[in-house]
Image (tube, rainbow, N blue to C red):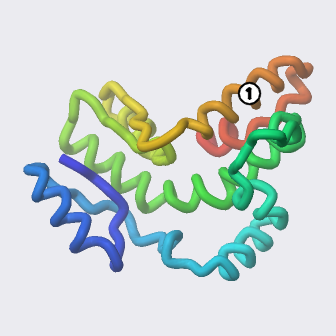
């Protein structure tokens, strides 16, 4: 079975792709419309969330010759902006709650989740299943997360701020 966010724009396509693969499609949550928002609307939303420097993290993904991408300040901003402007949007309460409810009813042995869909790990834990993070491309998220955690470990415990950990445990 494949569970994914309900989407007005993509639900028919999603269901067809999944069922054509011989699997059962299970739409959960409500459509967050994240990918249907214009660039201008995204900048406005990010400003409202307090992440006004969105372009710093999203426009130049060529990391060669950019030593600032490994600075503590840059990595913290990347973590904070990713949580407030992306992870918490695509893993909203309706999606996470619906996925947990479905997983508890179904009782799978394993929940495989796409690299940004932390709700999959939450659902796996809630139903006692094993969990696996599936990558569809280079794992820059994991790379930056490991470097962020390495740098945080060099700080005194009271100085360690971790937006992703805080969001996942709230």
Q: Residue at x 39, y 69 (%)?
A: 30
Element class at badge 1: helix
Q: In this view, does 116 lie above or below 133?
A: below
In the image, taking residue 165 as reference, residue 109 lies left or right, namely: left
- Where on the picture, by quarter, is residue 107? top left
Q: Position of residue 114 (x, y in %)?
A: 41, 44
Tag count: 1
User: In the orientation shown, which residue stands out farthest toward the front?
Assistant: 65
For the point 84% across and 44% down, which residue is it? 74
The residue shown at (67%, 41%) is: 164
User: Is 113 displayed left or right of 17 in the figure?
Assistant: right
Picture layout, residue 145 above or below residue 5: above
Residue 51 in the image, given as x and y percentages of width and height? 80, 62
Residue in front for this viewpoint, 47 or 61: 61
- Residue at left offset 31%, top offset 49%: 101
| Front-most of residues 164 and 60 | 60
Quarter of the picture containing the C terminus is top right
**Place of residue 20 in the rendered image (x, y in percent of width and height, measured from the top left):** 10, 58
Query: Could you classify mark 1 by the number of other residues whose Cα lies within 10 Å: few (under 14), some (14-19), or many (20 or more)?
Result: some
Q: Quadrant of residue 71?
A: top right
Residue 81: image location, x then y, percent? 73, 54
Q: Name the residue under label 1.
A: 147
């Amino acid at each position: 079975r494949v569970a994914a966010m309900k989407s007005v724009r993509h639900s028919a396509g999603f269901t067809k792709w999944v069922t054509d693969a011989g699997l059962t499609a299970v739409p959960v949550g409500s459509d967050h419309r994240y990918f249907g928002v214009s660039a201008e609307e995204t900048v406005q939303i990010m400003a409202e969330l307090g992440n006004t420097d969105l372009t710093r993290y999203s426009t130049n993904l060529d990391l060669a010759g950019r030593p600032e991408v490994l600075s503590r300040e840059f990595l913290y901003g990347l973590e904070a902006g990713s949580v407030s402007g992306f992870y918490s949007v695509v893993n909203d309460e309706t999606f996470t709650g619906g996925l947990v409810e479905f997983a508890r009813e179904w009782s799978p042995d394993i929940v495989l989740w796409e690299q940004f869909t932390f709700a999959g790990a939450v659902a796996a834990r809630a139903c006692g299943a094993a969990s696996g993070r599936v990558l569809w491309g280079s794992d820059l998220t994991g790379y930056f997360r490991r470097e962020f955690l390495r740098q945080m470990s060099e700080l005194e415990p009271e100085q360690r701020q971790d937006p992703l950990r805080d969001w996942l445990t709230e």
